Image: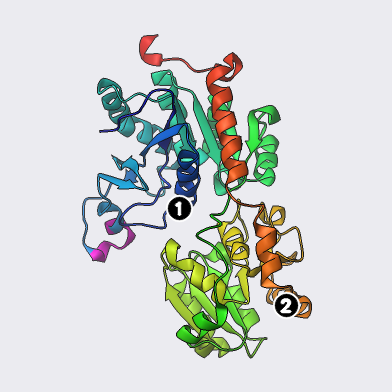
Amino acid sequence: MFIFKNNMTKLLTFTSLYPNAAQPRHGVFVEERLRHVVASGNVMAKVIAPVPWFPFKHAAFGRYAIRASVPKREERYGIQIEHPRYPVIPKVGMGMAPRLMYRALLPVFRRLETQGQDYDLIDAHYFYPDGVAAVLLGRYLGKPVVITARGTDVTLIPQYRIPRRQILWAAKHAAAIVTVSQSLKESLVTLGIAPHKITPLRNGVDLERFRPMDQPVIRARLDLTGPVWLSVGHLIERKGLHITIAALAQVPDATLLIAGDGAEEQRLRQLANKLGVSGRIRFLGAIRHTDLCEYYNTADVTILTSSREGMPNVVLESIACGTRVIATAVDGTPELITSPEAGELIRERSPDALVLAWHNLQGRKPERASTRAFAEKLGWEPTTSGLKALFTRVLTEPGCQQGVYGLKNT
């Protein structure tokens, strides 16, 4: 049972993007923010992290079976988490998704209320469907809702008419909105959402977990010599690994480490074979978040050739380890790579642009210590303080409560 102490801000974090025992890297950026807010003091939290319903756990069903294996309850970093199930209708159910999630989760919220497990506000992550469902729940229960926009939820999904209309409705009735970059705030304003309602608070990085280590020792253990490139992330088309592999073919002395898994892996392996670079690529599979520090320290550069990024944690983690980054200048990424010590931005998403950026980086060769020094202003403290101030304002200023009322009592 979730028990809260008095004199604390009590959050109910609601999101389908949250790590679990079966998917330890799923939504780790949400967990990182929450655990730092809780660790700062005066905030307690519980998490409702719904999982799409699926009946079979057999490995033959792939990612669907993984979802079925998610435990109903667990605890991580001292925070208690529930994983109720909700229905998803593939392909045709996009417009219905928030309502389906709301209907499935309403009994869970009613149970918490019946058990006296009170909370002050709903801390929702990802605008669609989670944020919309959270506002539906908040209006029924008379609780204010703060929605955090994180990327494709406001840059891609609003291209569809029905989701866009629901996102605008949720934004109107939310007590406040957080974006993880200034770029995402501008995207929301372009949709027609009032700027004063939106607070940009970037992701931070755990400067103790991600730190410089002894590179020669790690390289010797991994049997690596020469220039080392690193890619971290899901192997999906928009991450642009095909661009990185094509660039590798033009840099004959480099080795590429790929930390991640996903639907594009076989196609990327085929491309590597075609270009004759398969012997210089190591597909590492999914690496535990706690183990990534060594791989960042091994590399001379971390490469991110995405077509879209909200506020990429890969950039933050890499520079915290003293490893520079080459990344496409999209969305929130230019807000992080603002100094030569952090790395290079490429304006053209192509192998040639990536190779040119690599040679520029090699020509400058800033010290790893200077890259780490740049990262030290990007820890979690400013974001944590900003969030606590925002939550306090939501709970104390009457203007933030507009549109919040209990539908069950009307």
Residue 14 in magenta? no
Q: In front of the other: label 1 or label 2? A: 1
- Look at mark 1 in the image and give the residue it sits on: 28
Q: Residue at x 71, y 52 (%)?
A: 335
Residue 62 position, x and y percent, is 30, 63
Relative placement, left or right, of 407 versus 359 is left
Is 395 located above or below residue 246 in the figure? above
Whole-percent x and y of residue 177? 58, 33
Spot the residue most to the top.
Answer: 410
Q: What span is in magenta?
A: 59-65
Residue at 50% x, 72% y: name it: 294
Tell me the residue that label 2 is attached to: 352
- Going by the image, does 123 lie left or right of 335? left
Q: Is residue 38 above or below residue 66?
A: above
Tell me what residue is drawn at x 70 percent, y 59 percent: 374
Q: Nearer the viewer, residue 11 or 369?
A: 369
* Type of secondary structure dominating the magenta stretch: helix
Left or right of 295: which side holds 377?
Answer: right
Residue 262 visible in the shown view = no
Label 2 secondary element: helix
- Please count the marks in the image: 2
